[in-house]
Structures are given as C-alpha cells and as structure tokens.
Amino acid sequence: MTLDQFRPLADRALEPFVVLAKRLGLSPDAVSVVAFSLAGGAGGAFYVAGDQPMLYAVGAVLVFANGWLDLVDGALARELAVASAGGDFLDHVLDRYADILMLVGLAAGVGRYDLGLAAVTGVLMTSYLGTQAQAVDLDRVYGGLLGRADRLALIGLVAAVAAVVSQSVQGLTVIGWLLVVFAIVGHLTALQRFYYSMQALE
C-alpha cells in the first residue's frame, strides 16, 4: 500500500493553496518550478548537514514543501482548466531531477556514493516503469511497494530524525539505512510494476 492512493483525500486539503496560487497569479508550471527549487534546496541542505546535522531538519521541511506543491500544481491546472500534456511532461521531468538532487545530497552528506548510486537507480527505475506502462497503452502505474509520495514522506521523516540522532548501526547512520531501503525497495517496486504491466499486456 502506498500513499499515492490517498491523493483524493489530499486534494480536498489543497483548496486554500490553490486559491492562494490563483491570487498570486502563478501558473501550474510556475508552481512545478518552485517545487523543484525547494527539492534542490533540500539536496543542498542534506549535503551540508553531514557537518551540521540540524540542517537535516531544514531539508525535511523543504522536502515536505516540495511534496505538497507537487500536488498543488496538478490541482491548480485542473482548477484553471489548463491541464496539458506539456505541463504533465514538465512536472515529471522536474520530479525526476528533484529525486536525484535529494538522494545525491543525502548520499554526499554521509559520503556513501555507492549507496547513493543504488538508491538513485532504484528510484529512477520505479518512476520509469510507472510511465513506460503508459507508453505501451496501459494506465500509468503508481502502485507498488514504494511510490513517490512514500519516498518523500520517508526522506522527510528520516531527515528529521537525523537532525537529532547521529548514532550508527552496523556502520550506517539513519541516512545510510534510508539509502539502503531506497536501493532495495526501489528496485523491487520497479520489478513489481514491470510484472503487473507484463500481466496486463498478455
């Protein structure tokens, strides 16, 4: 079960933010760019937090803000009746770069580039399999063990913990173990999406 299935519930809480975005004259694409900028800030905070752990808390806030705005842009597009393939494409491209920046920041902050590489490839393959299903005329796949909403929630929560807990377990900090989870579960989620898609194509 993933958090993505609770999108309808989240949509009801988005209305005040959609109204605010409309009053500010923001387009859905502009909101997507702001969300991406916050993810970049989170990645930078995570990188520096290797020496200043309290910056993990700053990164956590930015991650949650990125996730929320990632919902707002879609809701705003529907409200303004300007949803388009181009906007959807831009949103997905920025989301992938946002994922990369956050994970690279986490890995670089603890000096575990090996785990970072494994985590990034797992996350990217999960997202790729989700959209590739659509490319072969299936519905876009959001399911699996670990969707984007789940990843953002985990990053935010673990980063908040890392701000106050620095102990290592088996040589890894909580950030290191988070990367391990993304590396393993990310690839499992990608394979799960692959399996479901292949079943649907038979």
Image: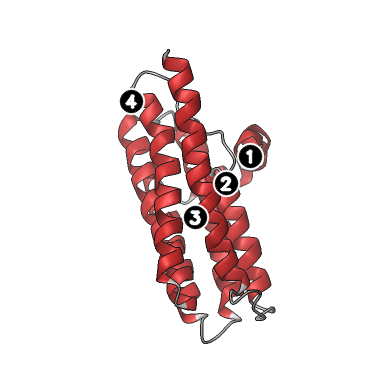
- In the rendered image, which residue does mark 4 sit on? 135
Q: Earlier in the sequence, mark 4 or mark 1?
A: 1
Q: Earlier in the sequence, mark 1 or mark 2?
A: 1
Q: Amino acid at mark 2?
A: Ala
Callout 3: 10 Å neighbours few (<14), some, many (20+)? many
Percent from the top left, x then y, of residue 198? 43, 22
Q: How far is mark 4 from mark 3, CA to CA?
A: 25 Å
Q: How far is mark 4 from mark 2, CA to CA?
A: 22 Å
Q: Amino acid at mark 4?
A: Ala
Q: Which residue is depicted at the point 45% across and 42% down?
A: 126
- In the rendered image, which residue does mark 2 sit on? 149
Q: How far is mark 1 from mark 2, CA to CA?
A: 8 Å
- In the rendered image, which residue does mark 3 sit on? 183
Callout 1: 10 Å neighbours few (<14), some, many (20+)? some
117 in relation to 161, above or below: above
- Classify residue 35 by image quadrant: bottom left
Q: Which residue is depicted at the point 65% across and 81% down?
A: 166
